[in-house]
Amino acid sequence: MSYKLYYFPIRGRGEQVRLFFRALEIPFEDVAVKRDAFLELKKQGPTMLAFGSLPMLEDDDFRLCQGPVILSYLAHKHDAAPVDPQLRASADAIAWGAEDLRSRYFKLFGDEADSKQAEFVAEEWQQRWLPHLDGLLASNANPEHFVGVQLTHADVAIWDVLDAILINIKPAKLDGFVNLRTFYDTFRKRPAVAAYIDSGERAS
Ligand SMILES: N[C@@H](CCC(=O)N[C@@H](CS)C(=O)NCC(=O)O)C(=O)O
């Protein structure tokens, strides 16, 4: 088995996959795709990049695009996804929820970033994302995970986007959302995760 992750040399949508590999201590090649190389890959059409976008995972001769699906695929291969179909779908739905939040977060930069960020935090972050994410943890059998009693791709996807927001959107905090705070801190302390983050190797 030989994994290659193709993504731009930034955090973006690729970091959740890098984090998954690191958290589960799965070896992979992190292929940093610069703009010219991206255009070359794109020219090769859908057998190379299904939708002309990255991230793309290569698992020997199998190629897969769409960040949350890459996570789900890897989780199933490495026993980090529920076996029960309903729990499995719930974990996928949460990974796609992380993608919704990430897409929203990407729009908070550029012109009038400060006011866009302040508005996002006061409204959607406080009123939608934090209560829903905290509530999902509260309703799970083990509130340190989003689904089931062990780490899944849902945890990785959510942790990555929360972390990006907490680092880059200054007014965003987890204050008052106890389950989410515990989830965030517990995941961060996992030895493989802490070693990766503390190494300073992460792209920003
Ligand atoms: N839904 C896709 C979105 C992929 C996507 O939009 N990727 C961006 C980078 S984060 C991209 O490759 N954009 C093409 C471009 O920059 O030309 C996923 O989750 O992977």
Image (spheres, rainbow, N blue to C red):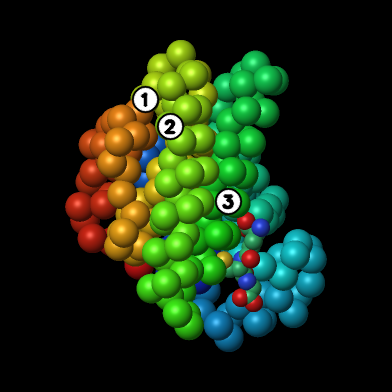
The image quadrant where one finds the N terminus is top right
Q: Earlier in the sequence, mark 1 or mark 3?
A: 3
Please give the name of the residue rendered at 60% of the width and 51% of the height, measured from the top-left corner. Answer: 100
Q: Secondary structure at mark 2?
A: helix
Tell me where residue 45 appears, x and y as whole percent: 79, 72
Please give the name of the residue rendered at 71% of the width and 76% of the height, measured from the top-left corner. Answer: 42
Which residue in the protein does label 3 denote? 99
Please give the name of the residue rendered at 48% of the width and 53% of the height, measured from the top-left corner. Answer: 123
Q: Secondary structure at mark 1?
A: loop
Asked whether, in this view, residue 51 is left or right of residue 32, the answer is: right
Q: Which mark is residue 144?
A: 1
Which residue in the protein does label 2 denote? 134
Tell me where residue 109 appears, x and y as whole percent: 46, 74
Q: Amino acid at mark 2?
A: Asp
Tell me where residue 38 appears, x and y as whole percent: 61, 77
**Residue 33 visible to the viewer:** yes
